[in-house]
Image (cartoon, helix red, strand yellow):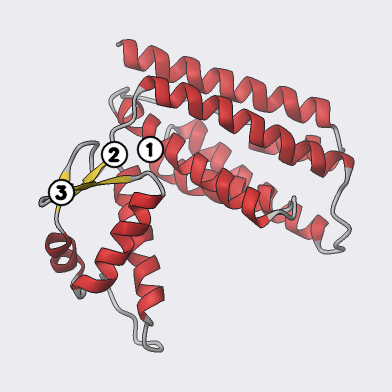
């Protein structure tokens, strides 16, 4: 892992950096479902000591991205199509709760309009990547978009849970999407429509957008899994 010339990195920061890097490796398809590796292999690959690597791997295991393989290290978790269906259902329930609250009881923080404008910019980038079929760029902007948008709800626990669920959803979908070839026009790009609906406090419109998104996502993955 590259090290900057800035202040010394603390163990907790390095632990998070490694966890984030490995999550990106999984979502980028470079670590594939079922692939096994050891703490030593990861530590040598990133040029760091074993302790923060082990801590990062334990964190990712707790988040459902890895499994601990006894006496063999760790393996990338393998999700099923049934898991994805359950994630979509859970995602829908959580999103409805978050955005109903945003529409009916908007945050009183005067910085909220600026924050929403920032979220919309993330949505524009995600939509652009979706239109181009650029999965790597889309995942990064999409995760940031939903995390920032859900954070406006003001419930950090709910926002963290929703983010974890979205990471797991992408992890489940990525193997199918990467086998699909050209993804132009096949990926959801309604991020800005959702922001606009929430800015209008249109809970019904936001619900319809999210419901359509979840239905399209499930249909696409089921189609690709069948192929």
Q: Mark 3 points at which residue?
A: 70
Which residue sits at x=25%, y=70%? 1
**Residue 30 vs residue 140: left or right?**
left
Q: Quadrant of residue 94?
A: top right
Q: In which quarter of the image is residue 114?
A: bottom right
* Foreground disc of the pair 3, 1: 3
Q: Mark 1 points at which residue?
A: 171
> Could you say whether the residue bearing mark 1 is in a helix, strand or loop?
helix
Q: In this view, does 212 lie above or below 61?
A: above
Label 2–label 1 contact, CB within 8 A:
yes
> Who is closer to the viewer here, 194 or 158?
158
Q: Mark 2 points at which residue?
A: 77
Q: Residue furthest front?
A: 70
Q: Where is residue 184 in the image (x, y as percent from the top left)?
A: 44, 26
- Mark 2 Cα within 10 Å, few/some/many (few <14, many 20+)? many
* Foreground disc of the pair 2, 3: 3
> Could you say whether the residue bearing mark 2 is in a helix, strand or loop?
loop
Quadrant into which the C terminus falls? top left
Q: Is residue 139 above or below residue 18?
A: above
> Who is closer to the viewer here, 178 or 19?
19
**Residue 126 vs residue 212: left or right?**
left
Real-space CA distance between mark 2 and mark 3, rounded to the nearest whole angstrom? 14 Å
* Foreground disc of the pair 2, 1: 2
Real-space CA distance between mark 3 and mark 1, rounded to the nearest whole angstrom? 23 Å
**Residue 56 vs residue 209: left or right?**
left
- Closer to the chain start, of discs 2 and 1, is 2
- Closer to the chain start, of discs 3 and 1, is 3
């Amino acid at each position: 892992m590259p090290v900057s010339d800035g202040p010394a990195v603390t163990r907790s920061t390095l632990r998070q950096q490694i966890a984030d890097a490995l999550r990106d490796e999984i979502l980028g398809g470079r670590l594939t479902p079922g692939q096994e590796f050891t703490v030593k292999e990861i530590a040598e690959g990133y040029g760091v000591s074993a302790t923060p690597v082990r801590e990062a791997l334990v964190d990712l295991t707790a988040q459902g991205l890895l499994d601990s393989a006894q006496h063999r290290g760790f393996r990338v978790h393998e999700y099923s199509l049934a898991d994805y269906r359950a994630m979509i259902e859970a995602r829908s329930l959580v999103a409805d709760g978050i955005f109903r609250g945003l529409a009916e009881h908007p945050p009183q923080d005067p910085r909220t309009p600026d924050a929403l404008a920032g979220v919309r910019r993330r949505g524009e980038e995600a939509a652009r990547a979706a239109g181009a079929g650029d999965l790597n760029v889309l995942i990064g902007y999409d995760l940031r978009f939903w995390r920032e948008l859900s954070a406006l709800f003001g419930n950090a626990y709910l926002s963290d849970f929703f983010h974890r669920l979205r990471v797991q959803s992408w992890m489940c979908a990525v193997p199918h999407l990467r086998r699909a070839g050209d993804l132009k026009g096949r990926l959801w790009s309604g991020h800005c429509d959702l922001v606009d609906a929430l800015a209008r406090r249109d809970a019904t419109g936001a619900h319809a957008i999210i419901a359509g998104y979840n239905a399209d996502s499930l249909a696409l993955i089921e189609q690709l899994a069948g192929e």
